[in-house]
Image (cartoon, rainbow, N blue to C red):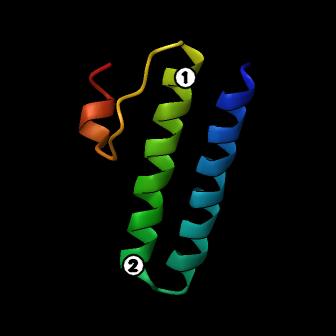
Amino acid sequence: MKNETMIWLEYAKENLKSSKVLLESKLYNPCLQNIQQSVEKAIKAILIEKSIVLKKTHSINELKTF
């Protein structure tokens, strides 16, 4: 696995862990924001691993079209 892929997956795991803490605290909006970030970073990790050039975007819909 590429080093950059591992970095993005670690970021995704951190956002997921944060979202769980926020959910337990009933802070739903920031929880959802962290879940979105986790999914986005995981998709970017997959694209990086497949050597697909990333477009600068935060849209999961745009990322999933690769």
Is disc 1 placed on a helix, strand or loop?
helix
In this rendering, position of residue 10 left or right of residue 55: right
Judge by depth and name the residue closer to the eye, 58 or 35.
Answer: 58
Percent x, y of residue 36? 40, 55
Q: Is residue 60 above or below residue 31?
A: above
Percent x, y of residue 8? 62, 40
Judge by depth and name the residue closer to the eye, 13 or 8.
Answer: 8
Judge by depth and name the residue closer to the eye, 56 or 41.
Answer: 56
Q: Is residue 53 above or below residue 22?
A: above
Residue situated furthest top in the rendering: 51
Judge by depth and name the residue closer to the eye, 57 or 36.
Answer: 57
Q: Which residue is drawn at the image coordinates 32% and 41% (left, top)? A: 57
For the residues marked 2 and 1, what is the alpha-carbon distance in whole angstroms? 30 Å
Instruction: Give the mark, 2 or 1, whose residue is nearer the N terminus.
Output: 2
Residue annotated with mark 1:
48
Q: Which residue is drawn at the image coordinates 56% and 80% (left, top)? A: 24
Residue annotated with mark 2:
28
Percent x, y of residue 37? 45, 54
Q: Is residue 43 above or below residue 15?
A: above
Q: Which residue is drawn at the image coordinates 54% and 86% (left, top)? A: 25
Q: Quadrant of residue 2?
A: top right
In this rendering, position of residue 38 left or right of residue 30: right
Q: How many marks?
A: 2
Quadrant the C terminus occupies? top left
Percent x, y of residue 22? 53, 78
Q: Dot 1: few (<14), some (14–19), or many (≥20) neighbours within 10 Å? A: some
In this rendering, position of residue 43 left or right of residue 4: left
Q: The disc labelled 1 sits on which kind of residue?
A: Ile
